[in-house]
Amino acid sequence: MFLWVIRRDLLLAMRQRADVLTTLFFFVIVVSLFPLGVGPEINMLRAMAPGVVWVAALLASMLSLERMFFSDYLDGTLEQMLLSPEPLSLLVLGKALAHWLVTGVPLALIAPILGVQFDLSIDALLVLTASLLLGTPILSLIGAIGAALTLGLRGGGVLVSLLVLPLYIPVLIFGAGAVEASSVGLGASAHLSLLGAFLLLSLVFAPWAAAVALRISLE
Amino acid sequence: MLKVTNLECVRGENSLFKDINFILEAGELLQVNGPNGSGKTSLLRILCGLAKPAYGEIQWRGNFIHSLDEEYHSVITYLGHLNGVKDNLTAIENLCISCALAGNEIDEKKAYGALQYMGLGGREALPVKVLSQGQRRRVTLARLLVCSTVLWILDEPLVALDNAAVDLVQRLLEQHLEEGGMVVMTTHQEINVTAVLTKRLQLV
């Protein structure tokens, strides 16, 4: 059941590859603009790299949030999911996971290549990937709440960013912080553990909150 | 048994309908009639638990449906105005996935059979977006062939269908009612279904 939702969303993403690639290219371009704009000052680039990559990842993952429920809402499949005998929060978890597989994972995988533009060390690149792998599912989960709340509203896209971006702040701080900490030799484990804690917390609460929001939006 | 007592639906300031009472037993068909905007769709959405009534109660076999929740979902099939099919998936994928999401996994062979029966033979592997409106409706209705639910709540199931398909659906409904199922449906078309008892509910 849970697997069916993931399989379905991945299948749909495969059929609409443009959507997936837009997010990825957005991420690549935003991250690449900074070295071009700031100039080849290596120390400055190194210092700003984690923040830039993480902010770009936040924006890229938000770009695709609106689609998480909207097309299902338009064609009536969301209505059918609400009538499923399985718990709705489980379905939402499946959808958030599929969203992460389609947006978060590619971002995390391409981030080390982009990090080279900022002259990050190998260690820093590994920590960057690890922090993105831990952090991007949180973005999808929290984003699911925002997407569910703004479903069917006019200008929902802008509203989603206003709702969700403040909630992304802790993830940004600890995600970017992990890379900074490892590059100054403090070790990233504290930051990564906190990210892991956030992930567990949002795994428990976000699907439930998004399910409640969906029921309200569809009434 | 579905029992509805004193149901009222309010939209904004206006009451769409109130004091709706009926009991639906096994083998019975309830046909909801009424002009556009009289609240037929709202009534059906309330009946399947998607919307909450302003007042009144709905009981399924003696239990309130909001307390049954997911258990209730496993005995109903709701087909609404929207077809609930994904344009980018093929007919067969749509059928398999929507059945799986309704908690009733079917194999491809069964799905092929259902689509064939609905007159979609040879078009099973086409993306639904290239099908006509009536053919999409047939994909949606194919779910009724393979589901094992008792209560069918159908909102204008005959829209966009040709005469042959209307006959097909009528036979499907008859068979379901014969087996002790229940149907609540809205339609503007005259239908010809023999049921143990056909009740009519007129909304104004």
Image (tube, coloured by chain):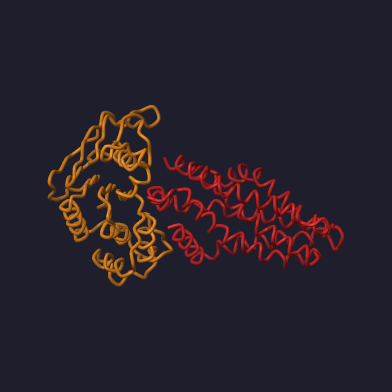
Screen quadrant of the N terminus of chain B? top left
Residue at figure coordinates x 84%, y 58% from the top left: A185
Q: Is residue A154 left or right of residue A75?
A: right
Query: Residue A201: where, in percent of width, then height?
Result: 60, 47
Query: Residue B16: where, in percent of width, then height?
Result: 32, 32
Which residue is the extreme one toward the bottom?
B122
Q: Is residue B30 left or right of residue A160?
A: left
Query: Residue A214: where, in percent of width, then height?
Result: 47, 44
Chain letter for the part of the structure drawn in red: A
Dividing the picture into quarters, in which one does residue B117 lie? bottom left
Query: Residue B73: where, in percent of width, then height?
Result: 34, 47
Residue at figure coordinates x 53%, y 59% from the top left: A98
Front residue of this view, candidates B39 and B62 = B62
Chain letter for the part of the structure drawn in orange: B
Screen quadrant of the C terminus of chain B? top left
Please, is residue A153 above or below residue A117 in the view? above
Dividing the picture into quarters, in which one does residue A38 lie? bottom right
Front residue of this view, candidates A53 and A40 = A53
